[in-house]
Amino acid sequence: MIKRILVKYAMKIITQGYPGKAIVAKLLYDNSYSSIEFLIEITAITRPPYAYCLYYAALLAKRLKIYRISAIEFGVAGGNGLIAIEKLAKRIHKEIGVEIEVYGFDTSEGLPPPQSKYDIPYRVQEGFFPMDVEALKNRLENAQLVLGDVKETVPTFIKKYDPSPIGAIFYDMDYYSSTMNAFQLFQDNDSYYLPRCFMYFDDIVGGPWQMYGNENGELLAIKHFNTQNEFKKIHKNQNLSCRASQPWHHQIYYYHNFNHPQYAQFIGGTTDQKIIMQVLKLR
């Protein structure tokens, strides 16, 4: 009863924008007062799009009776995103029993030269977002850095690292060309992926000067990937898009491999309705 009352008032502070929102959200997260699923729902968690993809990828894996998966970040830069993934992975493992390996791809030298006008050269340039490799390695616990241009590191990644099935991928590549090179990952053996993967694209919303659209950057890469592949598709989520109360709700996509041997495997019901009802009762 006391826990329920505490969560109820904490949620009011978070959802209604009262002072102390960040402190209360951290308290809920650090002390495990609520599930990650619930914390995502009320946006009381660090990097909610990362949490969303990681949590539901792990939950999907568990329903497929897979208890170890991989998560990948393309475009690590300073490494704060990768560190957040590590921390979320640890919490998710504790909560639902699925381990998550973490890999981060980056040139370590910043962005490579733009390859064409579709790489949005009017907004980003060669050398943007460099990495201090040694400083980042000292901050990481278990995540592995895969350094070099993705057009060279992605084709050899599976053979070199033998990762657990990939379930969540985060793209912060800026360029059309780099994103297309990263998509080469899906050419490997199906056993290295979940039949459906959760994806986050950082560079598809932006502001008035990015002017992202379906004909440049990451969105153009998604368009061309879908054109080039008959049975592998990347599409925008619908469950979050219909709510669209936050920018990241537009940045979650799903990868479907319709020929994956487990694609049609029944995964049971969903807890979505339970979580929604929990939120409604606390309002």
Image (cartoon, rainbow, N blue to C red):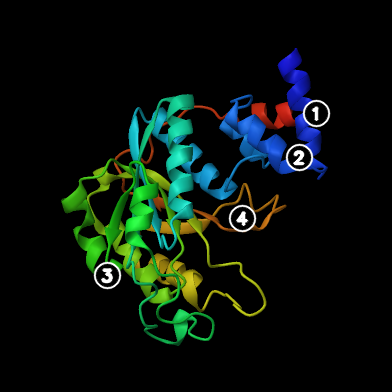
Q: Are marks 2 and 3 in contact (CB under 8 Å)?
A: no
Q: Check the image and report above or below for 244 versus 8.
A: below
User: The residue under label 4 is which amino acid type?
Assistant: Trp
Q: Earlier in the sequence, mark 2 or mark 4?
A: 2
Of badges 2 and 4, the one in the foreground is 2
The residue pinned by badge 2 equals 14
Residue mark closest to the camera, 2 vs 3: 2
216 on left or right of 147 = right
Mark 1 or 3 closer to N-term? Answer: 1
N-term mark: 2 or 3 = 2
Give the quarter of the figure containing the N terminus: top right
Measure the C-alpha gap from mark 1 to mark 2.
Answer: 9 Å
Marks 1 and 3, how far apart in space?
50 Å
Nearest to viewer (mark 4 / mark 1): 1
Q: Image check: 181 left or right of 38?
A: left
Query: x%, y% of residue 71?
Result: 38, 46
Q: Which of 101 and 223 is in front in this view?
A: 101
Q: Residues within 10 Å of mark 1 (few under 14, many from 20)?
A: few
Mark drawn on residue 267: none
Query: Label 1 belongs to which residue?
Result: 9
Q: Earlier in the sequence, mark 4 or mark 3?
A: 3
Q: Mark 3 points at which residue?
A: 151
Amino acid at the residue labelled 2:
Ile
Task: Give amino acid for label 3.
Answer: Lys
The residue at which mark 4 appears reads as 248
Residue 211 in picture, x, y percent from top left: 61, 78
Considering depth in this image, is 131 or 240 the residue closer to the camera?
Answer: 131
**Separation of marks 2 and 4 at Cα, in angstroms:** 18 Å
Q: Regarding mark 1 in the picture, which secondary structure is present there?
A: helix
Q: Which residue is drawn at 41% across and 25% down?
A: 97
